[in-house]
Image (cartoon, coloured by chain):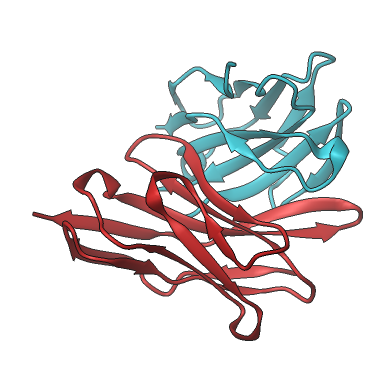
Chain colours: A cyan, B red
Amino acid sequence: DAGVTQSPTHLIKTRGQQVTLRCSPKSGHDTVSWYQQALGQGPQFIFQYYEEEERQRGNFPDRFSGHQFPNYSSELNVNALLLGDSALYLCASSLESRGGGTQYFGPGTRLLVL
Amino acid sequence: AQSVTQPDIHITVSEGASLELRCNYSYGATPYLFWYVQSPGQGLQLLLKYFSGDTLVQGIKGFEAEFKRSQSSFNLRKPSVHWSDAAEYFCAVGAWSGGYQKVTFGTGTKLQVIP
């Protein structure tokens, strides 16, 4: 049973560029949540996707956007990158259609913005 | 809005000693509570969770946690720590908002294990 997978594992970008991160949920899961974890901090909720729609959003600017595909996989897009966007980006999947599902995390994508 | 406080940023214990990591939450109703562990450069692994029922929850790797409503706490314990337990531990609270569950994490406690 494959767990949550994320790609790429590491990424280096420069300020102003755009980046796309990808996530495949755990088999059987229908909901994907994205988190940003800065160095030395806990994960901060970015947004959550269910049935291909964003249904919750944390305190992140519109530069952060996402998408969920019919196979439940998801992408996180960040435009106009800032130095402060350097972080570990975590994807978590759950079976929210049953309500209150437990979130299972992928290994993350480490983004460095220079 | 819910919140989680992990008052200890860093804890050092000797191998074989007992461990307790503190977690306090703020939420108006009964929350869902989680403990996750993160090894350096890795994602988060679920140790245990509390949704309802027995307030003493058993998890993987010999960890347990106790939900105490009166103290708004969900402390993580292990009777005998192994060197491989060195990692960062995050407490999280899941709360319902607009029909959806939103999970909020604490800032983490870094555990160092000395021989």
- Which quadrant would residue A113 be assigned to in this image? top left
Q: In this view, does B12 lie to the left or right of A14?
A: left
Q: Where is residue A15 in the image (x, y as percent from the top left)?
A: 49, 32
- Which quadrant would residue B34 be assigned to in this image? bottom right
Q: Residue at x 44, y 30 (%)?
A: A110
Q: Residue at x 29, y 48 (%)?
A: B85
Q: Where is residue B112 in the image (x, y as percent from the top left)?
A: 22, 56
Residue B38 or residue A35, whichever sits in front: B38
| Residue furthest to the front | B54
User: In the rendered image of this protein, does residue B91 appear above or below residue B40?
Assistant: below
Q: Which residue is drawn at 86% across and 25% down?
A: A52
Residue A111 or residue A22, whichever sits in front: A22
Q: In this view, does A109 lie to the left or right of B25?
A: left
Quadrant of image for the C terminus of chain B: bottom left
User: In the rendered image of this protein, does residue A80 appear above or below residue A44?
Assistant: above
Q: Residue at x 36, y 71 (%)?
A: B8
Q: Where is residue B87 in the image (x, y as percent from the top left)?
A: 32, 48
Q: Where is residue B37 in the image (x, y as percent from the top left)?
A: 43, 47
Q: In this view, does A30 lie to the left or right of A87?
A: right
Quadrant of image for the N terminus of chain B: bottom right
- Which quadrant would residue A17 be assigned to in this image? top right
| Residue furthest to the left | B115
| Residue furthest to the bottom | B70
Total numbered labels: 0
User: In the rendered image of this protein, does residue B45 appear above or below residue B15?
Assistant: above
